[in-house]
Image (spheres, rainbow, N blue to C red):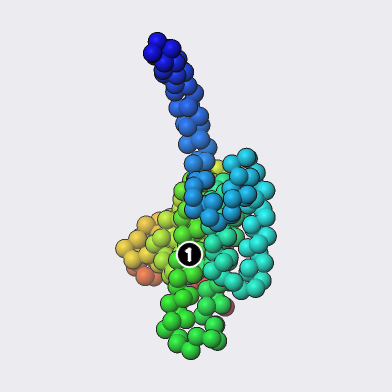
Amino acid sequence: MIRKLVAIGLLALFGLALTPFEAGLAQAQRDAFFRGAKLDLNLRESIGQMGFIAALGGFRSLIAAILWIEAHTAWENTEWGRMAGLFDTVTTLQPRSLLYWDMAAWHMAWNASVAALEDKNQPSEALRIRAQRQYFDLGRGFLERGIRNNPDRPQLYEQLGIMLRDKFDDHCGAAAAFAKAATFPDARPYLRRFAFYEMAKCAGREREAYEGLKKLYLSGEKERLPSLINLLGKMEETLNIPGNERLVHAQETQPQP
């Protein structure tokens, strides 16, 4: 009995000594946004027992690369459902790889959605459109999950803005995504402009968009692109900006192709 009590006491002391280390490790993982890879039973079912053991052994990158090749083969064979499942597994294994999230979203929202809309085996147009929209949603889901795993990087916010603009006609959402991407130090310089372009199409935010475009115009020649000048001129007309306050005169605007 004494030995058991001593053993229990030693285990308790070891646990207490380990607690600060585990807490520090957990915090480091959170700081690195690396809490998205869940090695659970769902993953085991996706990659099999040997693959799961390999993942536990630190070979997640290798397993993800192999499955990515399989996903590419599924794309070539137009096996969209299988491809989506493989993408789920790959992004689970490598949640900090922007390429995997980006390409998975692109394949779903662009390639698979077009194939669904043009599916000659489905005579119902309504069902083809429904399938197309489901693939849009899958693509958006990949980007949103990717952002949750990589909130410290601008690339997936930018891709979300493009998708919301081009596939969902959601100009308010696109404006927010582009604006968020533009806040990062390594963001592409055109993102602020894209944010205001989309904001100009967002009901109730036209004046805010105009003020933003105006600041860009006044910031220098490099921002005075034909697209910005045309939109600024149209907004000055729409918002009834007094003539003496307008930045764009009629002769500056150029017809859009």
Q: Nearer the viewer, residue 93 or 103?
A: 93
Judge whether residue 38 can be spotted in this image: yes
Q: Nearer the viewer, residue 219 or 85?
A: 85
* Circle 1 SS class: helix
Q: Quadrant of residue 102?
A: bottom right
Q: How many marks?
A: 1
Neighbours of disc 1 within 10 Å: few (<14), some (14-19), many (20+)? many
The residue positioned farthest toward the left in the image shown: 204
Tell me what residue is drawn at x 50 percent, y 64 percent.
139
State which quarter of the image contains the C terminus: bottom right
In this view, 126 is above or below 6: below
In this view, 34 is above or below 12: below
Residue 25 image point, x, y percent: 50, 29
Residue 27 image point, x, y percent: 47, 31
Q: Which residue is mark 1?
A: 138
Residue 249 image point, x, y percent: 48, 68
Residue 131 image point, x, y percent: 46, 76
Tell me what residue is drawn at x 53 percent, y 52 percent.
43
Q: Nearer the viewer, residue 104 or 72?
A: 72
